[in-house]
Image (spheres, rainbow, N blue to C red):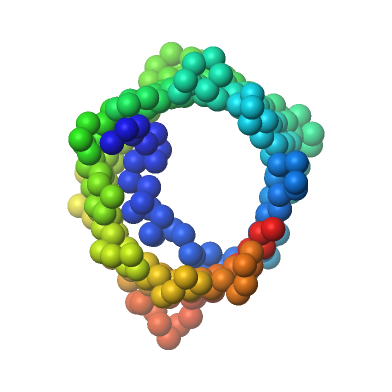
């Protein structure tokens, strides 16, 4: 293992099996384009079938590769504007600096973030300083890895309250075909996941979680099967008898269709099930 993942990416392979390929209760449209000069446009629109709420976002990104710079502009239907500037591998190899700001003209709310990240063999570190109307918060995280074993720590310090408000630990093991992840959040939330790549077509995952002082354990199993180069099928179920099904089909290069359904196994005949439709264009 050269460089370990960031703290938030620990256990990501298992999470992807549970989350990707589904869009319950949403009709979603994604459009991604890239111009010849490297300018990328991403627009997303979605409608909630239960609340009829429509949401959308627009993002433009330009990468100045020779100088390690990335400029990003964002806008969403909540009328929030965002600007992000990233510098990577310029001041030092493995060092990444990001300056992120957002502004809402309707409310006048402003926020800013300064993000730093450093990675090298066996180490991945990050520290973010977040400024907003609630005060200043410092988020720190670090992951070390050796021969497949991973250990990480994540914390949040709120300057206004002068104390640590978040303290999380994680330990795991990772290979190309197998991943084990366990975590403890604030000493009260416990979780774990297992990811297994059975072969080139089949991926499986198991997750579980419980809270201190509560005897109820939450768990689920999920699988993704790659039918061929253009189609895949996903399925998952949890201990609440909620069954999720997803089917993704590449209609033609650059056009992808996703169909999904969430079924309540305890109330099959009473309804309340959710359907989802997603369409993605990329050029």
Rendered position, 38 above or below 97: below
The quarter of the rendered structure image containing the N terminus is top left
Query: How many numbered discs?
Result: 0
Left/right placement of residue 189 relative to residue 252 reads left
Instruction: Name which residue lies at 75% across and 46% down.
Output: 36
Q: Is residue 4 visible?
A: yes
In the picture, residue 9 is in which quadrant?
top left
Residue 74 location, x and y as percent? Answer: 71, 40
Give the residue drawn at x 29%, y 27%.
122
Q: Position of residue 14 (x, y in %)?
A: 34, 54
Q: Could one spot residue 212 in this view of the protein?
A: no
Q: Is residue 187 left or right of residue 56?
A: left
Given the current orientation, which residue lies at the most extreme bottom position?
269
Q: Please state the horizontal and vertical placement of residue 224, each as a whole percent of the image.
A: 37, 67
Name the residue nearer the viewer: 258 or 82.
Answer: 258
Identify which residue is drawn at 26% across, 54% down. 177
Q: Which residue is at a point 37% across and 36% down the rendered structure image?
A: 5
Query: Where is 234 relative to 76, above or below?
Result: below
Residue in the foreground of this view, choosing between 36 and 274: 36
Is residue 146 left or right of 108 when viewed as pictured? Answer: left
Q: Quadrant of the C terminus?
A: bottom right
Determine whether 243 is above or below 219 in the image: below
- Depth order, front residue of 221/61: 61
Query: Residue 251, position in %: x, y?
Result: 60, 74
Residue 151 figure quarter: top left
């Amino acid at each position: 293992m050269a460089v370990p993942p960031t703290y938030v990416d620990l256990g990501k392979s298992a999470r992807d099996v549970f989350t990707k390929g589904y869009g319950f209760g949403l009709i979603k449209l994604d459009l991604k384009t890239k111009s010849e000069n490297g300018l990328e446009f991403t627009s997303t629109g979605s409608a909630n079938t239960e609340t009829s709420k429509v949401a959308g976002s627009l993002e433009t990104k330009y990468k100045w590769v020779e100088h390690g710079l990335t400029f990003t502009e964002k806008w969403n239907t909540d009328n929030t504007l965002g600007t992000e500037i990233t510098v990577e591998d310029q001041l030092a190899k493995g060092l990444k600096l990001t300056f992120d700001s957002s502004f809402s003209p309707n409310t006048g709310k402003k926020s800013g973030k300064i993000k730093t990240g450093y990675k090298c063999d066996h180490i991945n570190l990050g520290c973010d300083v977040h400024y907003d109307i609630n005060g200043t918060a410092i988020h720190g995280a670090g992951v070390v890895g050796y021969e497949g074993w991973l250990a990480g720590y994540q914390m949040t310090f709120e300057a206004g309250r002068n104390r640590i408000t978040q303290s999380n630990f994680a330990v795991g093991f990772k290979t190309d075909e197998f991943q084990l992840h366990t975590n403890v959040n604030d000493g009260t939330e416990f979780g774990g996941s297992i990811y297994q790549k059975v072969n080139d077509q089949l991926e499986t995952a198991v997750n579980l979680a419980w809270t201190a002082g509560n005897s109820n354990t939450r768990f689920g199993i999920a699988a993704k099967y790659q039918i061929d180069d253009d189609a895949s099928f996903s399925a998952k179920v949890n201990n609440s008898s909620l069954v999720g099904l997803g089917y993704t089909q590449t209609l033609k290069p650059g056009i992808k269709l996703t169909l999904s359904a969430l079924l309540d196994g305890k109330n099959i005949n009473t309804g309340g099930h959710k359907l989802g439709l997603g369409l993605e264009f990329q050029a």
